[in-house]
Amino acid sequence: MTRPYTGEWFEELEPGLVIQHAIRRTLTESDNVSFTTMTMNPAWLHLDFDYAKNETEFGQPLVNSMLTIAVIIGISVHETTLGTTVANLGFQETVFPAPLFHGDTIRIQSEVLAMRESKSRPENGIVTF
């Protein structure tokens, strides 16, 4: 059976490879409010314009950081692991060095940091992006 994919296979990757992702995404107020309410996050910082304007240093609502990470991962999938991965095993470190606001556009790159053969699944490899 043949199936389409755009991700890279283990053998096609190497540490140091940097992928400049073609897809970009501008985050909107609708994205932020929908995601924040759908995930049951009641934080005023994401939902209450009056609170954000008058009670925060930012003066406007922040894009929910979990939306940010979800979009970043989603953008990266097409050119890294779509159709070629077994599972996402986790995240070692996630930092948000600056806030995102409605109308900001996310542009990302992925770098292969390390790779090794799987000890529990010898037919698979583990890649750290």
Image: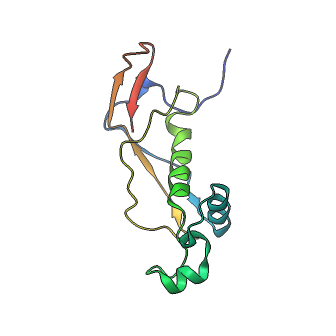
As drawn, 48 above or below 21? below
Q: Position of residue 105 (x, y in %)?
A: 53, 64
Q: Quadrant of residue 91?
A: top left
- Say left or right for 32 vs 107: right
Q: Residue at 54%, 84% (x, y): give it.
A: 53
- Say left or right for 37 vs 19: right
Q: Position of residue 29 (x, y in %)?
A: 64, 69
Q: Residue at 53%, 72% (x, y): give it.
A: 45
As drawn, 105 above or below 88? below
Q: Residue at 49%, 48% (x, y): give it.
A: 21
Q: Position of residue 114 (x, y in %)?
A: 32, 33
Disc tally is 0
Confirm whether residue 39 shows in the render: yes
Q: Relative to the observer, which residue lies in front, 69 or 26?
A: 69
Q: Residue at 55%, 47% (x, y): give it.
A: 75
As drawn, 22 above or below 52? above
